[in-house]
Amino acid sequence: MISDEEQQELAAVESPETKDVQEVPPLSIPDYVHELVTRARQAAGRLATLSTVVKNNALIAMADALDEKQTLLIEANEKDVDAFGTDPDKAAMADRLRLTEQRIADMSAGIREVAKLPDPLGDMPKMWTRPNGMQVGRVRVPIGVIGIIYESRPNVTADSAALCLKSGNACVLRGGSEAIHSNTAIAAVLAEAAEKAGIPPGAISFVDRPDRELVPVLLKQDRYIDVIIPRGGPSLMKTIAENATIPVVKHDAGICHIYVDADADQAMAEAICVNAKAQRPSTCNAMETLLVHQTIARTFLPRLMEKLQAANVEVRGCSRTCQLLPDAKPAADDDFGKEFLELVLAVRVVKNMDEAMEHIAKYGSQHTEAIITTNYQRAMRFLREVDAGAVLVNASTRLNDGYQFGLGAEIGISTSRIHARGPMGLEELTCSKFIVLGSGQIRE
Amino acid sequence: MISDEEQQELAAVESPETKDVQEVPPLSIPDYVHELVTRARQAAGRLATLSTVVKNNALIAMADALDEKQTLLIEANEKDVDAFGTDPDKAAMADRLRLTEQRIADMSAGIREVAKLPDPLGDMPKMWTRPNGMQVGRVRVPIGVIGIIYESRPNVTADSAALCLKSGNACVLRGGSEAIHSNTAIAAVLAEAAEKAGIPPGAISFVDRPDRELVPVLLKQDRYIDVIIPRGGPSLMKTIAENATIPVVKHDAGICHIYVDADADQAMAEAICVNAKAQRPSTCNAMETLLVHQTIARTFLPRLMEKLQAANVEVRGCSRTCQLLPDAKPAADDDFGKEFLELVLAVRVVKNMDEAMEHIAKYGSQHTEAIITTNYQRAMRFLREVDAGAVLVNASTRLNDGYQFGLGAEIGISTSRIHARGPMGLEELTCSKFIVLGSGQIRE
């Protein structure tokens, strides 16, 4: 029951270098995309009604397959890593990209975690009865086909495939060209294992061509793809804004602030600020700008500076900050509202909480905002008035995350205001349908 | 505290014909749109934190104002209706457009109903505590600025303004050019009443220029408008697909089916079919195609035909239908999958439920689908496997509606698969933010 096409795919997994030879002449880009999305669409119809047991078994088989094919995956990955050469400027990126035995084990463990999560489908929190006697309920169903366009590490391939499968959706994955060999190998291993476990072919569809001109074509497949989830930088977001005819749930920049209030527990504020900036600065929920109330700045900032320096954080301050911190650099105008994604922090002293909230409204990206305070009224007001996917009191911005919030694995953190906002887990990969149990009701 | 601009607006309400004179030279379209959406955006920030009492009082004031300004509204409406002339082909459209005292009273009653609905904002169904002690909750907040582009009767102006205001959103309304005088007058009356009641100016923003080239400009205001809700025909949908950079929640065609199973209560099936087709054929949830199981067709169809004929419904049947119904016209190929929106019904005899479900999957628009059956297993299978915003057993498709489902007033029936699917009430005009109550938690 294995088609020629799948046999080719299998052959490609075993020996990727033979692929180009077999595929002459290649399909045109529109034909290639059409074939891919048609197959995904067909898979989606069948996926929607698969039992949880079948899906979980497939997920476990996918995890096992990654573990078994470690050597193959590492070989494919070496091609991507080697392409970066020995340029020291690119060493960090090459390192992010690198697959090790441990990282592959983490990927497969992630898939096993998804298998353990409750199936979101079929959930119907309540049914209610209308005056005419008909019962109405809203049941959770898959969205259909989810397109994910990403520029991140190869683990996103495995995470996305697992989350889409568990939520009954087919996925069309398009990774960055810098990870094309790694992603192609991972996707092929996962798709093969899934199919052997009874998942329809096409359920895990991967764009194995790095051509840049393919993305605009993909973004217009609104008949076949129901939603696009982009994860990447400004140039990807621009391509999507200009080309997508498919609804988009964005995973865009996080320009996150912490406001340290006049009434703050200073030790707590220090610990949270260092964590929010330095624990993993490349993430979207890391703090980029610190706002400090003027009455606490004189005591708080110098002590914080010591800890930040110990963590190799460069501080760029407003003029008042620089008066208090001789080691701080003066902030440029565009340092406020910038997503540094590295060990750099903009710091501004503010008159009061209103000024802090105005700053956040002006410069923030409505991703994650936090206040550190012991004052009840100001905590409540900050929670109510600050507009962001997540607003925290006395906690690190780094905690805005699906696992940390207890939602299970996440596909990312949505910066959209429709469909899903904040961490996007299995439930956010579904939609609903109303069902009505009637006994002959008509509209009067 | 009334600005010059508002005074002009007020003057325009009192005597619309003076407006053109005052507004020479008019703003360019981009400038006009920019001014409108900027004002709406500013209003949105303040609207989000208004109390329920202020919003409800404003809604009641808006309803009162419509009642008080009946004469003015009817005068404005006459200009629109007169523009249709005496062409009998357009009589139905002109009639749909016409405002009467009764229709204005219905609009104001609709707004009062919205005032009575619970405020969806601030709702937080649960908070949960994570192992590290932080408490996490998801609270309902407004989307922000909602753009509504419609081609429907003028009551949509009042309904949309009321629903957006109640849910804490600013709205930018763009009605059809055929109703420009009516809609402009309604929107001005509503906006004036709302402002007097403490609602920020711009909260109810109306595009009072009929220029067609304005719509593509509006559809690119993604910095100011958070979501576009289009309600209209294929040409509007095409414009939106081609131009929108703003997320869209579509209100598209309803190609709705009823499948009458072999085991159906025939009297119930008759009553439901007549209701679904003829009670109000111009709506998106009216039945367009009837599918009848072959074993019941011989007895069921002739009896149904009598009732359909009594209701002036024209039947276009497949060849087997035409054998059973001498009065039926043969259906053309494209009659299946067509949204007639009038007293025309396509009828097909099917071998079994599988054939019916295949037909629905192929020709339906995933809007509203119903089965009439006394068989439990087939009812459950139809509910599970048919993919639509609403799937009904033994009830008329006309019941797929926000009021009928008990959701309160609706802005329309979404045919999107993301954000909202099916009837879209107050809750669907909101999004969420996570809030975290911490006590010093950091990411480990």
Image (cartoon, coloured by chain):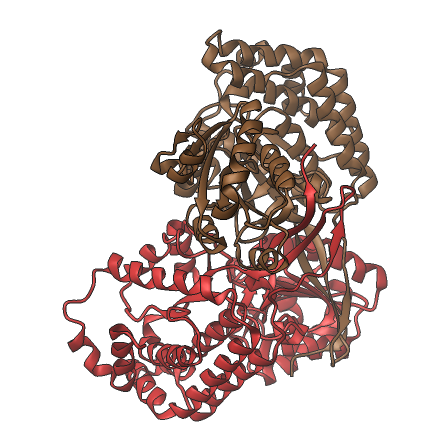
Chain colours: A red, B brown
Q: Name which residue lies at 47% across and 39% down.
A: B219
Of the pair A292 and B165, the residue shown nearer to us: B165
Q: Name which residue lies at 40% across and 35% down.
A: B323
Q: Is residue B245 left or right of residue A53?
A: left
Classify A343 as above or below A77: above
Q: Quadrant of residue A301?
A: bottom right
Q: Quadrant of residue A209?
A: bottom left
Coordinates of residue B355 in the picture (x, y in percent): 44, 53
Q: Quadrant of residue A302?
A: bottom right
Of the pair B385 and A280, the residue shown nearer to us: B385
| Number of numbered tags placed on the structure image | 0
Coordinates of residue A318 in the picture (x, y in percent): 61, 63
The outermost residue toward the top is B86
Q: Would you say residue B192 is visible in this rendering?
A: no
Of the pair B282 and A394, the residue shown nearer to us: B282
Placement of the C terminus of chain A among the 4 image quadrants:
top right
Classify A240 as above or below A410: above
Q: Would you say residue A179 is visible in this rendering?
A: yes
Q: Is residue A213 left or right of residue A227?
A: left
Of the pair A314 and A425, the residue shown nearer to us: A425
The outermost residue toward the front is B299
Coordinates of residue B9 in the picture (x, y in percent): 64, 20
Classify B6 as above or below B434: above
Placement of the N terminus of chain A among the 4 image quadrants:
bottom left
